[in-house]
Amino acid sequence: MTTKKDAVQKQLNWPLHRYVAAWFVHGFTMTGLLWALLAVLALYNQEYKMMWLWLGIALVVDAADGPMARKAKVTEVVPWFSGTMMDNVVDYLTWTFIPAVFMAQVLPLGPSILPIIAACMVLMSSMFCYANNLMKSADWYFVGFPAAWNIVAIILWVFDFGVYTNWAVIVIFTVLAVVPWKWVHPFRVKQYRAFNAAAAVVWVPATALLVYFQPVTPLWVTIPWLVAGLWILAASAIRTWRGRPDRLK
């Protein structure tokens, strides 16, 4: 039986380069706070495309730090420092909080207090992601909408929808945060992984191009963007309707 003393002793036995690697990964994750700060300043200055640039960099960091952390075994080398907690803080800022403020400030959501109500719906429903210990299924799908409000906000902004459409989308995704709809992780879910990853590889740069060209939405960008997005939604819907988990190999 491993005691607490044994665990501490094991921690002290790691070579120096393993500590350096672990803290490098943590430092890499912490850069998300810098990108969040720059995004807030850009939003304050109404430089919306720059805001999305900084949030895009934060997204790249978020996609990369997980595999880096697993390779460096950070939870074993530095068990007292929670990279998961830090990652959740950064993600809440960059995936949820800043996009919620953006939606309240920029999108047409009606007069008076209505934009604040919409932002509160976004912020509060996201707790069912960040505070949910059952957010990931055994086969690596998200259970409930994974608080990806940056994606929602960028779509509503790029395509310049009206008040009613914006509200309908916010209400739908708020509800989806608390129902057990499965959402595919493009790189961790094994079922259709090659297609899921390919869809993500197409969708992300296509989204960046839509931001660059906004308020114009070129057809040559919109079509591959739409096809890739529909694939991700279809893969999620298939898993939800089937009910049973994917076969894990």
Image (spheres, rainbow, N blue to C red):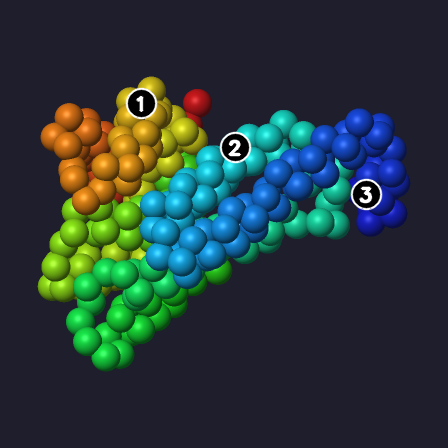
Secondary structure of the residue carrying numbered label 1: helix
Q: Nearer the viewer, mark 3 or mark 2?
A: 2
Is 240 or 29 nearer to us in this picture? 29
| Residue drawn at (31%, 42%) of the image | 183
Residue 193 pos. (x, y %): 35, 24
Q: List the residue tagged with mark 2.
A: 64
Could you tell me how far apart the alpha carbons at marks 2 and 1 are, in whole angstroms?
Answer: 17 Å
Q: Quadrant of residue 247?
A: top left
Secondary structure of the residue carrying numbered label 3: helix
The numbered mark at residue 198 is: 1
Q: Amino acid at mark 2?
A: Ala
Could you tell me how far apart the alpha carbons at marks 1 and 3 are, in whole angstroms?
Answer: 41 Å
Residue 192 pos. (x, y %): 30, 24
77 to 158, vertically: above or below? above
Q: List the residue tagged with mark 3.
A: 7
| Residue drawn at (56%, 50%) of the image | 33
Residue 204 pos. (x, y %): 33, 32
Residue 90 pos. (x, y %): 53, 51
Secondary structure of the residue carrying numbered label 2: helix
Is 186 or 118 nearer to us in this picture? 118
Mark found first going from the N terminus, 2 or 1: 2
Q: Quadrant of residue 98?
A: bottom left
110 to 185, vertically: above or below? below
Q: Amino acid at mark 1?
A: Ala
Is 225 or 72 nearer to us in this picture? 225
